Image (cartoon, helix red, strand yellow):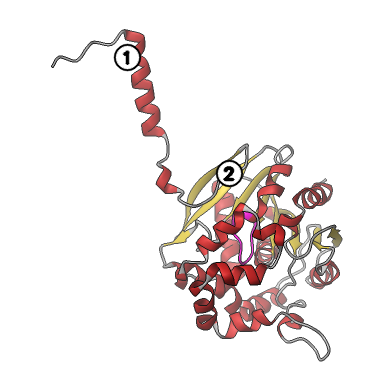
Amino acid sequence: MVPRRLPVPAAILVILLAVAACAAPPAEEEPGCGVAPDGFEHAHAQVGEDRLHYVVGGEGPPVVLLHGFPETWQAWRGVMAALRAEHRVLAVDLPAMGCSSSTAGTGQRGMDKTSLARTVHGLVRQLNLGPVAMTGHDMGGMVAYAYARTFPQETSHLAVAGALLPGYGLQTLIDPPPGQNGLPHLRWFMTRPEQAQRAITSDPRGFLTRFIATPEVLSSPAFEDYVRVYSQPERTAAALRLYRTLPADAAANRRAARVPMPGLAVDGASGMPESVATSLQRAGTSVRAEAIPDAGHYAPEQNPDAFAEVLRRFLG
């Protein structure tokens, strides 16, 4: 059978489509990483032993967003969309978490906050972003502070949301004084990580539903991503190492000099915004404190527009 010869324009179109198909990244490179908000795209970068997954978009002064536990980059979806018009926004899956991976083995990778900050810094340098505004929620807030104290000349602003810093107030939540409430999961994750891992991975949906206990998060598409990620024993083990390294983080923070950039302490109004501000002040930065209305610990997901507006005012 002799193939029919195509007209020249049609032949050119076929060639262009073939080239485009070859140039497009294979879908399997980003399985289960979620749909990027409008104006954003998924990307990967190799930084040392880590292959970091991040979602990037927008134009303007750069803002880096770091998630906590039990989250991924998707915790920032609403905030990203609201910031895109004025900022270059980079939401990163922390090393060995979300869709990021490590050649060292996900569960074995060191998860002290200084090491994580250095890896994020490697990504920022690769992308040639210059001084960035570091913003982190929960454990991501601790990494954001480690970044600011390690690279002060490359950090324009520091925003910490829903987190007390190791060495500067977090211990009161691990070992609360008599008559005060702490956060029991902190000590459990620190001292019995194998038991905690079994509890999480044996019933990830049930565990995360009870742990998060926030309707706005549980009903969001992001929650399905959290269930997927923390169904994986190695990624859960890496996340729990965030807690096992807290004593080392506290020592590193206390050795650090004061950070020179402006600071923002933020949490939901029903969370602990005053405690976050006190912790950041003790860590040595000038602080603006903000409470997000109609939100608690998961303020970036519960009220993303208000959270983004607070960030916009802070960043000027």
Q: Quadrant of residue 162?
A: bottom right
Q: Secondary structure at mark 1?
A: helix
Q: Which residue is mark 1?
A: 11
Residue 143: image location, x then y, percent: 65, 65
Q: Residue furthest top?
A: 7
Is residue 31 within the magenta segment? no
Residue extent of the magenta highlight? 66-74
Secondary structure beneath label 2 = loop
Is 281 above or below relative to 170?
Answer: above
User: Residue at the left extreme?
Assistant: 1
Q: Nearer the viewer, residue 280 or 213?
A: 213
Location of the C terminus by quadrant is: top right
Tell me residue 315's x, y (percent): 80, 48
Residue 68 forms part of the magenta stretch:
yes
Query: Image point 73% across, 56% down: which residue?
Result: 300
Would you place residue 73 above or below residue 186 in this image? Answer: above
- Mark 2 Cα shell of 10 Å, populated few (<14), some (14-19), many (≥20): some
Vertically, is 73 above or below 169? above
x 60%, y 58%: residue: 223
Q: Find residue 118 and report its horizontal and vertical position in percent.
A: 57, 62
For the N terminus, the image quarter is: top left
Secondary structure mostly seen in the magenta stretch: loop
Identify the amino acid type marked 2: Ala
- Residue beneath label 2, please? 36
66 on left or right of 32: right
- What amino acid is found at the position of numbered circle 1 in the picture? Ala
